[in-house]
Amino acid sequence: MKRIALKPLSPTAKRRLIVTVLVLIGLTVAYKVLYPLAFESYVGKTNAPLTYASSTALTKTEFEALAQELSTNARQRKAAAIVDTDQEPFARQVKIEMLMNTESFIRDTEPSHIKYFREAGIHRYEGPQTCLHCHATIQVTHGDGTVKNVDTLGDIVNSVHFKFQSESGGFSTYGYDGRQVNSGPHKIPVGKINRACGIPGSFTWTGWAALVASRPEHGEGEVTMRSEGCGQCHIGGNYQPATEKMMPIGDVPSEAKEGIDCLICHSTDYDMNERHVIQDDKGLRWNQDRSLRAALTVGPISSETCLRCHQHNMGGDAYLHNEAARSLGHINQRILHRGAKRGNPFSPHDDTHAASGIQCTDCHVPEGHKIPRGRKGVDLVANDIPTKDVTCESCHTQAPHNQSEHKALLNGHIARLACETCHIKELEAENVVLRDWVHPTWDSDEGLFEPTDIYRSGKPGKGFTFLWFNGNGTFLANALGNNPNGSDTYNPLMQQVARIDDPEMIAAVRSKATELKQQYPEIDVDAYVRMATDPLSQLSPEMLAKREAMIQNNLRAVMSQGESRIYPFKLFNAMMFEDMSNQGPFGAMILPFDYASYYETGDTPASVKKAIADPIVQRMYQEPFKLYMMDEFMSYFGITEGWKTVYPLVDGRLENVEPHWMRQMGTLMVNHGIQGKGRDCIECHSPDGIMNFRQLGYSPERVAELEDIDIIENLKEQPDSAAAQ
């Protein structure tokens, strides 16, 4: 074979090569070392190596003793699930023990990771690095059937569960300016990380982890430290959320990646009592269970593991069957939030799918660590797989009523009604409808100030309402859709979600306002009731006219897209402090609270001052943030003049900051708490039924027909072919 002689490089070429290599090395060093340091300094956040007291090494003898205990427990659970409960207890226990000691039970029931850890000689769990010892890559099956091997850690870090936002397209959310969020060339990070919300009263930048000094009445003045913050329900264990992932370049540092809590999702024996805030010389962060017990009981994802966090969102902390809320912490116990955010728990006690043993991931089918919410949504909670459906029809088809003698009539409703409309009868009674963060009240049992829930209800027409929905929502969580008759009379942003006209609700708000006035004499009860029940009364005539025009010009076309059906939506509004320099016809920029000072003192203006003094909020009011994100953010918000960088804290005083109710109620999707038996016809089809057909855009003639139960009963008696027409 003829050898090819390589020509030596010329001196000029050598210099160019050396310069190129040095530049590449310099850029790498800058990206890996200098940029992270500069970013930390810019946003005022901390990254540092993390340690956890629960991560301890076991001796070989201790390991085997733990393995024996876990194997016995697993055999006992499996046998108890098999042996019939309808028998004398002693006889049942004897049968359970017999099964437990059979060879197949002993062979097949030991948690699989015991063998893996034993063979690898791992006697201490050290977080993701331990998992990656075997799981450096994973095989992911995508919705189109393709299979790919992906980097496990990268898959997690780029999931919504870690970074809490997405800067990609695919949002089902539209700005009040009429544009679909992130559908254009200028994409911004949007999600829970940077969006202040009236339910938690803050956003993750300023409310990640806090220690609150409480003084419960039963403690006779003794201080008890409590844990609070967004980090309690998220998988990151660092001193801050993944703020770096909001930037177009950069990555979270290795310390943050090592803080990921794999076991809260993957372990069956995870101890939620380890979930509490700890403080070290770097700051505050959330503790986690890194015990070998938790690591050895890794198993398939189940509803139980999902609900460690998500029942907080659905049933609420105070929900009777929220298992995670029973283990609030060995120390610095988590604060138990009394009001439910959505009030639709996924539990065998209140949901027919949960009672049937259906798991969360049976509907929300993951692709690796990416989990779909479904195509439909009314808020800005980012979606890992926005193209993937999560619907009732995926299992039940478009004709689910196949056993009823009135199946044609019932299946005919599918064209106009979502399944949830009939099969969610009520939400939890603790469902929060109106929350006042500005006027907190003292909770003597907890020993701290809490936001005042002005109204709670799970009843239809009070805690939730019915709206046309085509799968899209607004920037502030309002469902979009329209009556299929195309009428412009359906206008929920000026009616259903902008006004409370139920006399019972108004009376309840007045009663609570009168009670609050005893603590806050400056409250004008009449004005308070008017703003809470008619939030548009807070707008000037000019701003109100602009709102109406933007609905007609920007949103009407989006409302008429696709096919709309009537869905139930949980209602929510909150009184918050707002930056009035950045206000529009749909509201003003909501300002966060500092949790510790809020809960401890109840001094809400001081709490806002402390929160907005956070360096990252200060950066938000500077030109780089304005150009990178805030102008676009505010345009979606309905403020097309751009972000005003007028910092609202001057010489220790709040400038142009006012308390207001949001200008419309949010409408949150409720899809759980499903009952097997649907509503009776008369619940909707009567003059005093739960469905306001007039506000839903029907003509007076059609309203009269829909409210006449005799017409419905006559349809029932007709043959299926006639009833279906």
Image (cartoon, rainbow, N blue to C red):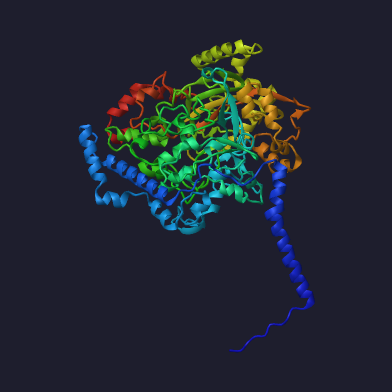
Q: Is residue 283 above or below residue 678?
A: below
Q: Is residue 285 left or right of residue 461?
A: right
Q: Position of residue 479 (x, y in %)?
A: 53, 33
Q: Is residue 306 above or below residue 426?
A: below
- Report which quarter residue 553 is drawn in: top right
Residue at screen point 52% across, 48% down: 127
Q: Position of residue 346 (x, y in %)?
A: 41, 34
Q: Is residue 577 left or right of residue 351?
A: right
- Report which quarter residue 522 is drawn in: top right
Residue at screen point 32% across, 44% down: 72
Residue at screen point 60% across, 51% down: 254
Q: Is residue 665 left or right of residue 461?
A: right
Residue toward you, 410 or 9:
9
Residue toward you, 262 or 664:
262
* Residue 205 in view of the camera: yes
* Residue 491 in view of the camera: no
Q: Is residue 271 above or below residue 2?
A: above
